[in-house]
Image: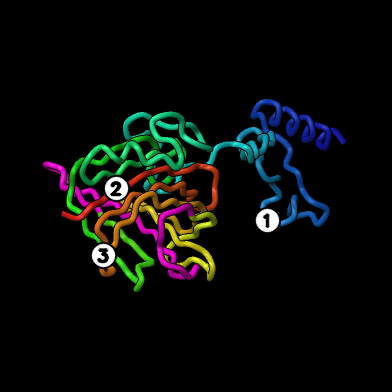
């Protein structure tokens, strides 16, 4: 009895002196929580035997990171977050582009993926592609080579090929991404600097259209484009004339 009592005292004294701690063992005698072969509870600190609190759950309402390639600032003055940008360019108003010569202006919401903020593109090289007879498609491609930097390029594409009807002066609602619009829908696509929409909704209006023998002589257009069917909007206007 004395030897057994001394053994128990020695064991208890050793645990107190060394700071040992109990381990949680499951009912099967060799493991604790299901899936743990060591008998250690998930999250338990091996040095103290105290279970650490689980990591905090991610905030489902927190902001998502912008898609790769998105610029969170703006070009020039920035627009509002979502919805229509404020000032400088009004939806459906081409006057800012009617200052003489070929002009392209982009004005996106601050959260717009294609072009956040306001910018009037400097004079550059233009390539025009048309389709249909009578004409039902215009694609304006713009390129500007910056000194010491890579070139910049933008494209404005409007079409009524699947309406089907010739492209004429007037508004076009319910636009989808050109050239993948559904039958009966006008097509629209404004893209550039390596960014474009996979899907889009929006509208455009042709304010001026001069055509001679199916050759485009001049066009003025405005648009409202919602990339990925979201709230941020890209407004813009373009004026191009031959010669």
Q: Nearer the viewer, residue 47 or 124?
A: 124
Please tell me how crowded label 2 is: few (under 14), some (14-19), or many (20+) other residues with Cα within 10 Å: many
**Quarter holding the C terminus?**
bottom left
Mark 2 against mark 3, which lies toward the viewer? Answer: 3
Q: Position of residue 219 (x, y in %)?
A: 31, 53
Q: Position of residue 118 (x, y in %)?
A: 35, 35
Type of colouring: rainbow
Q: Quadrant of residue 119?
A: top left
Mark 1 against mark 2, which lies toward the viewer? Answer: 2
Q: Callout 2: helix, strand or loop? A: strand
Q: Earlier in the sequence, mark 1 or mark 3?
A: 1
Which stretch did the figure color magenta? 142-171
* Residue at point 44%, 55% (across, down): 197
* Residue at point 30%, 50% (across, down): 193
Q: Callout 3: helix, strand or loop? A: strand
Please tell me how crowded label 1 is: few (under 14), some (14-19), or many (20+) other residues with Cα within 10 Å: few
Q: Position of residue 168 (x, y in %)?
A: 41, 59
Label pair 1/3, CB-CB below 8 angstroms: no
- The residue at which mark 3 appears reads as 212
- The residue at which mark 2 appears reads as 239
Q: Which mark is residue 37?
A: 1
- How far apart are the two marked residues, 1 and 3, measured between alpha carbons? 82 Å
* Residue at point 49%, 60% (across, down): 176
Q: Let me know if residue 150 appears in the view.
A: no
- How far apart are the two marked residues, 2 and 3, measured between alpha carbons? 17 Å
Looking at this view, name the residue that lies furthest to the bottom.
Answer: 133
- How far apart are the two marked residues, 1 and 2, measured between alpha carbons? 72 Å
Q: Is residue 67 above or below residue 8?
A: below
Q: Which mark is residue 188?
A: none
**Quarter holding the N terminus?**
top right
């Amino acid at each position: 009895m004395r030897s057994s009592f001394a053994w128990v005292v020695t064991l208890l004294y050793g645990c107190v002196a060394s700071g040992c701690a109990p381990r949680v063992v499951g009912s099967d005698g060799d493991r604790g929580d299901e899936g743990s072969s060591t008998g250690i509870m998930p999250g338990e600190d091996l040095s103290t035997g105290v279970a650490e609190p689980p990591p905090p759950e991610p905030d489902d309402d927190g902001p998502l990171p912008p898609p790769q390639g998105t610029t969170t600032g703006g070009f020039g003055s920035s627009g509002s977050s979502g919805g229509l940008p404020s000032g400088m360019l009004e939806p459906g108003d081409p006057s800012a582009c009617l200052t003489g010569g070929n002009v392209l202006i982009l004005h996106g919401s601050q959260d717009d993926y294609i072009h956040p903020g306001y910018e009037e593109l400097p004079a550059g090289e233009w390539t025009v592609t048309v389709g249909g007879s009578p004409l039902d498609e215009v694609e304006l491609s713009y390129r500007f080579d910056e000194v010491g930097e890579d070139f910049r390029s933008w494209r404005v594409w409007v079409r009524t090929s699947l309406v089907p009807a010739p492209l004429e002066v007037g508004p076009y609602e319910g636009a989808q991404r050109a050239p993948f619009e559904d039958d009966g829908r006008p097509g629209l696509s404004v893209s550039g600097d390596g960014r474009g929409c996979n899907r889009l909704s929006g509208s455009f209006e042709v304010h001026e259209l001069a055509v001679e023998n199916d050759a485009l002589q001049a066009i003025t257009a405005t648009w409202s484009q919602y990339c990925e069917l979201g709230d941020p909007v890209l407004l813009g206007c373009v004026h191009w004339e031959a010669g």
